[in-house]
Image (tube, rainbow, N blue to C red):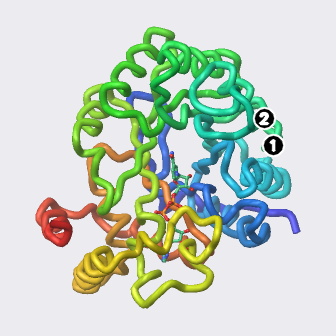
Amino acid sequence: MDFIAQDNRYEKMPYRRCGRSGVSLPVLSVGLWHNFGGVDEFETGREIIRYAFDQGVTHFDLANNYGPPPGSAESNFGKILKKDLKPYRDELIISTKAGYLMWPGPYGDNGSRKYLLASLDQSLNRMNLDYVDIFYSHRYDPLTPLEETMGALAQAVRSGKALYAGISNYPPDETLEAARILAEMGTPCLIHQVKYSLFKREAEDGLAAVLREKMIGCIAFSPLAQGLLTDRYLHGIPADSRAAKPHGFLKTDQITPDIQSVVIKLNSIATELGLTLAELALNWVKSHDFITSVLIGISSKQQLQTNLRILDLPDFTQDQINKINSCLT
Ligand SMILES: NC(=O)c1ccc[n+]([C@@H]2O[C@H](COP(=O)([O-])OP(=O)(O)OC[C@H]3O[C@@H](n4cnc5c(N)ncnc54)[C@H](OP(=O)(O)O)[C@@H]3O)[C@@H](O)[C@H]2O)c1
């Protein structure tokens, strides 16, 4: 049956302005790193994307290598676009990236102009799109001049194959320099995609200040620490969880007794506040002023429904944040 989006899809989701740009992002965005690849159930992924769009999630994040196999998340997303979302293309912010290993030989990895521009063409082919909204350099490459990597992003924008340029996983000083070069080229840095959660707070050490000062948007990835900051692993390792899957990036040895004891403490604070642990962890990220959007992964529609409940929550006060943070020390 043809998909017709809900008329009320924009009633609930707040949108935050992305840095100094004209574009806004939903407070919750959905990423396709896990659960949307060739090894996954296509119809489950399709149901999640359709439901997300109906709830006002306008931003879907991909990368060339998402799968497995690499590329398959983009191919599957292309199929979902074709079946369901093509009429809504102008209501979507679709991003992709290049920077990690994608194909063999010297030109399928890191930050060269050769790799980035070829990869963008491949991504557009897989998704059957004329352009993506955001094209990212997926990581800083110390062996390639920043002028070359940023030049490739700027060319992607000038050629119309991307509307905005972004960077991901860049340290603070390199972020400043990348932003300076991009601004000089007339294609400002729209956004930085950074790992940020209760368990990964390095962004607070310098990067957040750079993003504030330069008015660059910030989208936080792995806000649930790949599922650790949920009730998923409170009682062992469920068979259908990321940690149990051979291709999952979360490994069982990351679920240490120390982590579990912090998770139990956080879970009891969540219970005191009448929240699930996932809601607490997501609302904690959302409550920081340098965050434009919280970029979640999900393996089911039910998880998305739970996570969307943070739209009803006010941002945590500084006292609440301090109390939550005190579990981590
Ligand atoms: N730029 C980069 O270098 C980079 C790196 C990593 C990720 N990303 C982006 O960030 C996105 C999100 O990353 P992520 O998937 O690691 O995010 P995450 O939100 O930290 O973790 C997602 C996982 O948490 C579990 N989960 C989610 N909601 C839940 C709930 N309500 N209750 C219980 N468990 C729940 C699910 O695990 P199960 O699968 O076990 O159910 C889900 O797969 C990616 O898709 C990608 O777009 C970017």
Three-letter amino acid code of the residue under disc 2: Gln
Residue at (71% x, 66% y) in the render: 45
In this rendering, is residue 89 above or below 251? above
Three-letter amino acid code of the residue under disc 1: Arg
- Residue 171 visible to an observer of this rendering: yes
Q: Is mark 2 within 8 Å of ligand 1?
A: no
Between 165 and 259, the residue placed more toward the observer is 259
> Residue 91: which numbered mark, if any?
none
Reading the image, the residue beneath label 1 is 126
The C terminus appears in which quarter of the rendering? bottom left
Query: How far across and down, in percent of the image, does residue 268 sit?
Result: 25, 85
- Residue 85 visible to an observer of this rendering: no
The image quarter containing residue 152 is top right
In this rendering, is residue 147 above or below 127? above
Q: Is mark 1 within 8 Å of ligand 1?
A: no
Residue at (34% x, 68% y) in the render: 281
Q: Secondary structure at mark 1?
A: helix
Query: How far across and down, in percent of the image, does residue 307 sit?
Result: 47, 70
Reading the image, the residue beneath label 2 is 122
Q: Is residue 118 left or right of residue 158?
A: right
Separation of residues labelled 1 and 2 (CA atoms) = 6 Å
Between 320 and 209, the residue placed more toward the observer is 209
Residue at (69% x, 20% y) in the render: 114
Query: How far across and down, in percent of the image, does residue 286 sit?
Result: 34, 57
Q: Secondary structure at mark 2?
A: helix
The image quarter containing residue 212 is top left
Count the labels in the image. Answer: 2
Query: How far across and down, in percent of the image, does residue 282 sit?
Result: 37, 64
Task: Look at the numbered discs 1 and 2 and tell me whether their residues touch, using CB distance below 8 Å.
Answer: yes
In this rendering, is residue 217 above or below 174? below
